[in-house]
Image (spheres, grey):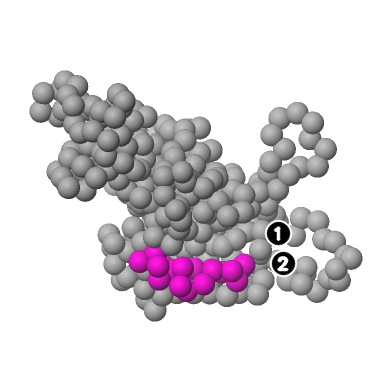
């Protein structure tokens, strides 16, 4: 019986048929489901979605989000979960593995999520947390797993040590072993893993960036996307921060070392109008001339006056005219592609 035609090269087709017969599935293929176009989950920020190149975070990969304290890492992850729920519902509920014990249900609720329809896990050790990641992902019944955070994961050996005793490399070894499985589980079961991490400083570094992340090198190696989050108080509105997200690693699109900046309202999410205005200005679709706002009209393709009042004037203009918001949003994604 001739081997199944995969590539048209007889020797390769014979090897592929032999492997499939021996291991029970096709491992050699010309184009398989693992390498189809990425299915994105929106981050909730138009500028970040467009900057990432695929319209959001990949729905079946490992993603690391790291940065200094109070930068908005957890809030950004919760916003991703909110976008996931808005698209797919709670049929495959999101999972929150809280090792830090610092996140309250009021924050989850304020982000538009229903805590009663989510799964919350409070493991005591890193072994328990990573085993949960594997077992829940293998079920294929969960869509997003948030691991908060890597640095808070304490190995079982470490829990039994005295304060003056040290153990070198316990957590990196655990992560390296677990992520070999998790990186495959995420693809096979269409599950997004969001690992939150903290930054530390390498002692004695005289040149270059002394900043590093906790947990060794396993997470940076196995992550398909790495985002560094930083923030400062917003100058436009109270109770908001200006969030800056840098794409440190991206294996799903040709977008690297790009930066997205947007206003994030604490407990609510991205301010979508100012987010769109900022990105449109950065890519040249909107220009501010004094108080006048000009844009390239999609009907004529020429620069015309849109409104007055600067950024806040344009924001109010889009609130009053939703079709302008929709047109400008579409133009931003067309420009990025």
Residue at the image position 29 percent from the left and 67 percent from the top: 89
Identify whether 111 is placed above or below 213: below
Give the class, few, some or many, for how many residues have Cα within 10 Å of label 1's Cα (few <14, many ≥20): many
Question: From which residue to which does the magenta span run?
Answer: 93-112
Identify whether 260 is placed above or below 85: above
**Label annotation for residue 314:** none
110 with respect to 337 (left or right): right
Residue 239, image x and y in percent? 46, 56
Is residue 214 or residue 246 the one in the foreground? 246
Residue furthest out toward the right: 164
Residue 17, image x and y in percent? 37, 47
Residue at the image position 81 percent from the left and 56 percent from the top: 168
Residues at marks 2 and 1, CA–CA distance in whole angstroms: 6 Å
Quarter placement of the C terminus: top left
Residue contact between numbered discs 2 and 1, judged by CB atoms under 8 Å = yes
Residue at the image position 49 percent from the left and 62 percent from the top: 146
Q: Is residue 144 visible?
A: no
Residue furthest out toward the top: 302
Residue at the image position 44 percent from the left and 38 percent from the top: 260
Residue 307, image x and y in percent? 20, 33
Q: Earlier in the sequence, mark 2 or mark 1?
A: 2
Is residue 275 or residue 306 the one in the foreground? 306
Q: Is residue 314 visible?
A: yes
- Is 30 included in the stretch rendered in magenta? no
Tell how many labels: 2
Residue wearing tag 1: 171
Is residue 190 or residue 214 the one in the foreground? 214
Residue wearing tag 2: 155
């Amino acid at each position: 019986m001739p081997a199944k035609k995969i590539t048209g090269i007889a020797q390769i087709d014979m090897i592929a048929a032999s492997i499939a017969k021996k291991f029970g599935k096709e491992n050699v293929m010309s184009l398989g489901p693992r390498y189809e176009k990425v299915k994105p989950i929106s981050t909730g920020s138009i500028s970040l979605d467009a900057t990432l190149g695929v319209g959001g975070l990949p729905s079946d990969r490992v993603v690391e989000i790291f940065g200094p304290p109070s930068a908005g890492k957890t809030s950004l992850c919760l916003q991703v979960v909110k976008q996931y729920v808005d698209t797919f519902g709670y049929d495959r509920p999101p999972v929150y593995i809280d090792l830090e014990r610092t996140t309250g249900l009021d924050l989850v609720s304020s982000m538009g999520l229903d805590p009663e329809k989510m799964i919350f896990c409070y493991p005591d050790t890193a072994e328990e947390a990573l085993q949960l990641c594997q077992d829940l992902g293998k079920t294929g019944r969960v869509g997003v797993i948030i691991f908060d955070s890597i640095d808070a994961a304490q190995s079982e050996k470490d829990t039994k040590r005295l304060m003056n005793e040290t153990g070198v490399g316990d957590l990196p070894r655990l992560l390296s072993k677990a992520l070999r499985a998790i990186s495959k589980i995420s693809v096979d079961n269409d599950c997004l893993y969001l690992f939150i991490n903290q930054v530390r400083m390498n002692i004695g570094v005289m040149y270059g960036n002394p900043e590093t992340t906790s947990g060794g090198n396993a997470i940076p190696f196995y992550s398909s996307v790495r985002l560094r989050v930083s923030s400062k108080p917003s100058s436009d509105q109270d109770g908001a921060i200006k969030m800056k997200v840098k794409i440190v690693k991206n294996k799903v699109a040709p977008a690297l070392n790009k930066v997205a900046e947007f206003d994030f309202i604490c407990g609510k999410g991205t301010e979508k109008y100012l987010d769109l205005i900022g990105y449109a200005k950065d890519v040249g679709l909107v220009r501010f001339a004094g108080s006048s706002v000009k844009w390239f009209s999609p009907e004529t393709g020429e620069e015309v006056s849109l409104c007055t009042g600067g950024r806040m004037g344009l924001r109010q203009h889009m609130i009053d005219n939703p079709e302008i918001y929709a047109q400008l949003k579409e133009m931003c994604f067309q420009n990025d592609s």
